[in-house]
Image (cartoon, rainbow, N blue to C red):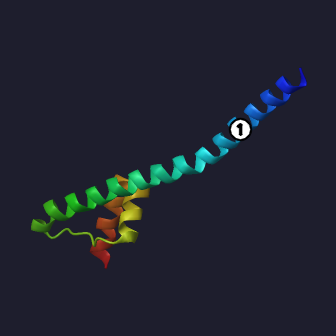
Amino acid sequence: MTEYVVLIFAAIAVLVVAKLLAWPVKKIMKLAINVVIGIVMIILVNNFGASIGITIPFNVVTALIAGILGIPGVILLIIIGFFI
């Protein structure tokens, strides 16, 4: 009988640890996907905006800003580009 109780507690402990470790991985994967989307948005702005003089420098910082903030981040980068 005590073996079953230990087995149940061990299974619960494994599930809790797996859940705790999965949380940061989900956040990192979400950030990576957002950065890729940000890169695509910067490329689109550079391709279609070049004819009217709107370009965004392509580097890690701009990709992170566009990835974390999304479309508002790209708009922010365009506005910042006008001031610099």
Q: Can you say whether 71 is above or below 50 in the image?
A: above
Would residue 60 be seen by someone viewing this image from the given angle? Answer: yes
Camera-side residue: 66 or 72? 66
Which quarter of the rendered picture does the N terminus lie within? top right
Decide if residue 22 is on the left or right side of residue 46: right
Q: Which secondary structure lies at badge 1?
A: helix
Task: List x then y, in percent, for residue 41.
Answer: 27, 56
Please state the total of marks drawn on the protein image: 1
Residue at (33, 66) in percent of width and height: 77
Tell which residue pokes out farthest to the right in this image: 2
Camera-side residue: 57 or 14? 14
Would residue 69 be seen by someone viewing this image from the given angle? Answer: no
Residue 44, quarter of picture: bottom left
Tell which residue pokes out farthest to the bottom in this image: 84
Residue at (41, 63) in percent of width and height: 64
Q: Which residue is mark 1?
A: 14
The amino acid pointed to by label 1 is Val
Camera-side residue: 53 or 18? 18
